[in-house]
Image (spheres, rainbow, N blue to C red):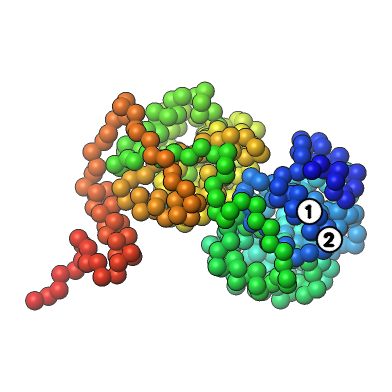
Amino acid sequence: MQWTDFKLNKQLFQAVEEMGFSSPTEVQQKCIPLILGGQHVIGIAQTGTGKTAAYLLPLLMKVKFAQGSDPRALILVPTKELAVQVLAQARQLTTYTDLRVVALYGGVGPKAQIEELNKGVDIAVATPGQFMELYLRNVLPTKQIKTLVIDEADRMMDMGFMHQLRKIFEVVPSKRQNLLFSATFSDRIERLSQEFLEFPIRVEITPQATAAKQVEQEMYQLPNLRTKINFLEYLLADHETFNRVIIFARTKENADNVFRYLERKKLGPLRVIHSNKGQNSRINAMNEFKLGQLRILVATDVAARGIDVEKVSHVINFDVPALYEDYVHRIGRTGRAFQEGRAITFATKAELYHIQKIEKLIRTKIPVKKLPDEIRIEETTPEEAQTMAREIDRQKKREDPEYGGAFHERKGK
């Protein structure tokens, strides 16, 4: 299928050509005609499959040209990073049109966003909280909204946005086209879709929560945090192979510690992003990484969905994620746009429980590799050993509520 097979105008064809989209991806082939036809659509597709353009192109075709001052389409996204990413792609696609797209997100003063809204807008990309805040200030009229897109719906559910989404459904016109996109289709997503989609057509590109085919996955079992650091340093010493790397840590503290260690060892240039970093700091780090000015980006899962960078050579899971869908999103940062990628996961004994759950979700075994002989195995500190033992106890108790555990309280005599 070629781009010319779609009923798009020449301005959009020209923008697509300049962006280097050689041919439409599977999600684009299936969703674009349905959305142009006015259908309600549920799109289940991993990140990196081209789903943003799959809803943006038909949306831009429907809105067509600047008109009036109130938004006619609303795209809801879970994070500031994703809002910025969708805005960037929308602006590239609208290069040869007069369409006005604005991104609305928290963490910055609302003054500049209000000024943009006052100039007139055709499409708003917004996080739910910021949308409601601006609506309640009476600076964001909703009466003209004819299309509502919920992107990264699974992340919306993880972040507890259901209450805010219901409020938004109440203030936008009930007669509208609804589109929902998600990497996974959990029970919560199904409930959400039943609430706001009428007779939707479900398009599922890959089996639910499958890791991208072009990502080579591997896992190494390591005894403790310090050995993880040794192995990370060993891998990153190979500058040629590990040329554009994202390292994911579970906590802000771990992310900062990894960043400081690698910076001290002069293995960068690198930056760290997590929720404690200011909005401008996060956006600047992402832009530097995209432009190839950084070799390494250390991040927590808050950034897992907002990174759209081609030719990421490796994703390293320094910690195994506690939300299992996040594994899919993390490794989806590499192997994008038909490139091949590699995802390496470090797992301690306490993290193997989560690995089993992830393998069940992605319906495949992650190959376990032998640690190179050169890696120095550190002694586990008593504190870390106890923390891991408590975690293993907690896991066993979750599987078997009758399990007493090594740390259970002794009953008084």
The quadrant of the image that shows the N terminus is: top right
Residue at the spot x=23%, y=38% of the render? 379
Q: Position of residue 26 (x, y in %)?
A: 71, 47
Quadrant for residue 367, please give it: top left
Q: Which mark is residue 32?
A: 1
Task: Judge from the rendering whether residue 44 lies leftward or rightward of residue 258; answer left or right.
Answer: right
- Residue at image mark 2: 37
Q: Earlier in the sequence, mark 1 or mark 2?
A: 1
Q: Position of residue 164 (x, y in %)?
A: 63, 70
Quadrant for residue 396, please give it: bottom left
Q: Secondary structure at mark 1?
A: helix
Is there any visible trace of residue 266 in the rendered image? Answer: no
Residue at the spot x=81%, y=55% of the render? 33
The amino acid on which the numbered mark 1 sits, given as a three-letter code, is Ile
Q: Real-space Cα distance between discs 1 and 2?
A: 9 Å
Q: Position of residue 398 (x, y in %)?
A: 33, 65
Looking at this rendering, what residue extends furthest in the left direction? Answer: 413
Q: Secondary structure at mark 2?
A: loop
Q: Nearer the viewer, residue 137 or 386?
A: 386
Task: Judge from the rendering whether residue 408 lies leftward or rightward of residue 1; answer left or right.
Answer: left
Quadrant for residue 392, please give it: bottom left
Is there any visible trace of residue 248 in the rendered image? Answer: yes
- The local crowd at label 2, few if under 14, some if 14 to 19, many if 20 or more residues have their Cα within 10 Å, is few
Q: Nearer the viewer, residue 108 or 48?
A: 48
